[in-house]
Image (tube, rainbow, N blue to C red):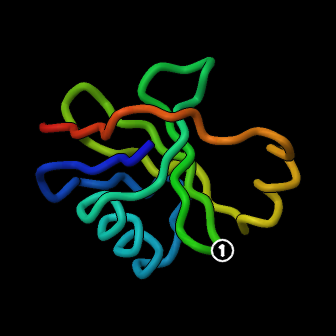
């Protein structure tokens, strides 16, 4: 699915990642990024960015919590054989 936020998101950087990492995520969410919803947690997503994955939560207020970031290679090994489900374009407004 594509995840795109209509407004520039406020991102809480809970693990103190570099500012460039947060800006990269903000750009992805503003432009639209491939994302996979967490099937066990509402409003939690894995967001793809080339060689990186981000794990985020979008709060009801629209605030984004950056919970984790890791190299995509690890994510692909974990999700081997799992394809993104065909889902409509998701747009969130805050």
Which corner quadrant holds the N terminus?
A: top left
Residue 54 on image: x %, y %: 56, 56
Residue 46 left/right relative to 58: right
Q: Relative to 25, does residue 75 appear above or below in the rendering?
A: above
The residue positioned 71% from the left and 65% from the top of the image is 72
Residue 44 on image: x %, y %: 49, 32
| Between 61 and 41, the one nearer to me in the picture | 41
Q: Which residue is mark 1?
A: 51
Q: Quadrant of residue 32?
A: bottom left
Which corner quadrant holds the C terminus?
A: top left
Q: Residue furthest front?
A: 86
The residue positioned 51% from the left and 65% from the top of the image is 16
Residue 67 on image: x %, y %: 54, 47
Residue 10 left/right relative to 47: left
- Secondary element type, mark 1: loop
Q: Residue furthest bottom?
A: 20
| Between 64 and 14, the one nearer to me in the picture | 64
Residue 7 left/right relative to 65: left
The residue positioned 31% from the left and 65% from the top of the image is 26
């Amino acid at each position: 699915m594509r995840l795109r936020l209509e407004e520039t998101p406020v991102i809480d950087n809970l693990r103190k990642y570099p500012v460039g990492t947060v800006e990269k995520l903000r750009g992805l969410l503003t432009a639209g990024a491939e994302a996979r919803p967490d099937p066990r947690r509402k409003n939690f997503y894995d967001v793809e960015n080339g060689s990186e994955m981000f794990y985020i939560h979008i709060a009801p207020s629209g605030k984004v919590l950056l919970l984790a970031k890791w190299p995509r290679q690890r994510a692909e090994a974990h999700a081997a054989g799992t394809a993104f489900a065909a889902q409509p374009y998701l747009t969130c407004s805050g």
